Image (spheres, rainbow, N blue to C red):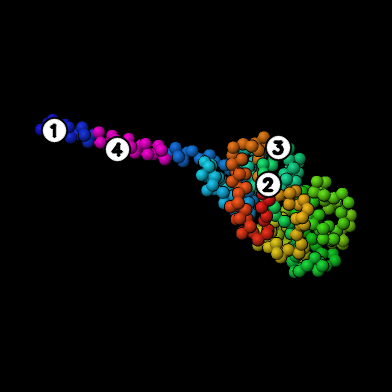
């Protein structure tokens, strides 16, 4: 009887050890699967950049990457965070702005890929066409170097002002370079504040607004008084980019991110979601 009891106890002990061992293996396997994902941290403007990035989370996960999106509301912090190593990449700007930022701040950030183009638009408070802009009207434009140039080129395109003959995105212009302001009161203000200032302005005020800020404010390209002529080099010059630290353009993380974005699925999402306010450039 004692032998039988001892045998039963031994069998129970063995079964318990096997069960525990199986549980540890399962937990370890699950932990290994979770730990296998490599994190890619990307800074982005909320609209449309973060929205577009959301579309590639699953495909990146399938390739072994966990995409973390950090949303910023301005044009400075995502570059400083990238330069400081807090981000692996960012997605909010075009090349002229990046080059201007590097020159002004001593940063070394580079273009890893062109993703989309957002046509600059001119919008009016109680104004239905360019021809209806009254003499002496206030025109709001973004104040940072590259976007100020872009806004002034749009005003010149519409015949509202005259710029030097050599004015271009490459050369750059500011309000100080205007040859003839057409009698308008042109005011350069912080880019993200332009939509709010237009909404709170006197009737007759006009504003040139970045595409992403126009989207956030609920403004539609179809309602713009004018947009950039995309038949020229505007689309390439002002394409929104994936930026990274110089030297990391071909790193595994950045390459995976760019490849995930440059797909037919992302292009279809952009076409169906933004009605011409955002255009895929790949």
Q: Is mark 3 on a helix, strand or loop?
A: loop
Q: Where is residue 113 in the image (x, y as percent from the top left)?
A: 67, 44
Q: Is mark 2 on a helix, strand or loop?
A: strand
Q: Which residue appears at 82% of the width and 61% of the height?
A: 158
Residue 19, numbered circle = 4
Query: How many other residues sit within 10 Å of disc 2, few (<14), some (14-19) or many (≥20)?
Result: many
Front of the two marks 3 and 2: 2
Q: Which residue appears at 62% of the width and 36% of the height?
A: 251
**Residue nearer the viewer, 100 or 259:** 259
Query: How many other residues sit within 10 Å of disc 1, few (<14), some (14-19) or many (≥20)?
Result: few
Mark with earlier residue (4, 2): 4
Mark with earlier residue (3, 2): 3
Is residue 75 in view?
no
- 3D distance between C-alphas at marks 3 and 2: 18 Å
Residue 114, numbered circle = 2
The residue under label 1 is 4
- 3D distance between C-alphas at marks 3 and 1: 77 Å
Task: Reply yes or no: does residue 33 show up in magenta.
Answer: no
**Residue numbers of the magenta segment:** 14-30
- 3D distance between C-alphas at marks 4 and 2: 54 Å
Q: Position of residue 249 (x, y in %)?
A: 65, 38
Question: Which residue is at the far front?
Answer: 264
Residue 108, numbered circle = 3
């Amino acid at each position: 009887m004692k032998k039988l009891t001892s045998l039963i106890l031994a069998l129970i002990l063995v079964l318990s050890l096997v069960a525990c061992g199986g549980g540890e293996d399962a937990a370890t396997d699950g932990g290994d699967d979770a730990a296998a994902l490599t994190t890619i941290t990307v800074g982005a403007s909320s609209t449309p950049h973060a929205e577009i990035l959301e579309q590639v989370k699953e495909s990146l996960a399938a390739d072994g990457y966990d995409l973390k999106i950090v949303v910023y509301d301005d044009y400075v912090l995502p570059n400083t965070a990238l330069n400081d190593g807090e981000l692996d990449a960012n997605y909010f700007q075009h090349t002229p702005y990046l080059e201007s930022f590097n020159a002004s701040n001593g940063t070394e950030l580079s273009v890893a890929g062109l993703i989309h183009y957002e046509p600059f638009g001119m919008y009016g408070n109680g104004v239905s066409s360019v021809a209806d802009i009254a003499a002496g009207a206030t025109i709001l434009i973004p104040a940072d170097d590259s976007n100020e140039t872009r806004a002034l080129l749009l005003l010149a395109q519409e015949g509202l002002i005259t710029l030097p003959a050599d004015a271009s995105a490459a050369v750059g212009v500011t309000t100080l370079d205007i040859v003839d302001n057409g009698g308008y009161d042109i005011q350069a203000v912080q880019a993200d504040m332009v939509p709010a200032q237009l909404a709170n302005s006197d009737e007759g005020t006009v504003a040139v607004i970045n595409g992403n800020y126009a989207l956030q404010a609920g403004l539609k390209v179809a309602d713009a008084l004018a947009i950039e002529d995309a038949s020229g080099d505007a689309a390439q010059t002002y394409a929104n980019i994936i930026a990274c630290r110089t030297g990391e353009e071909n790193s595994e993380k950045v390459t995976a991110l760019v490849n995930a974005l440059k797909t037919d699925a992302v292009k279809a999402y952009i076409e169906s979601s933004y009605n011409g306010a955002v255009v895929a450039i790949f």
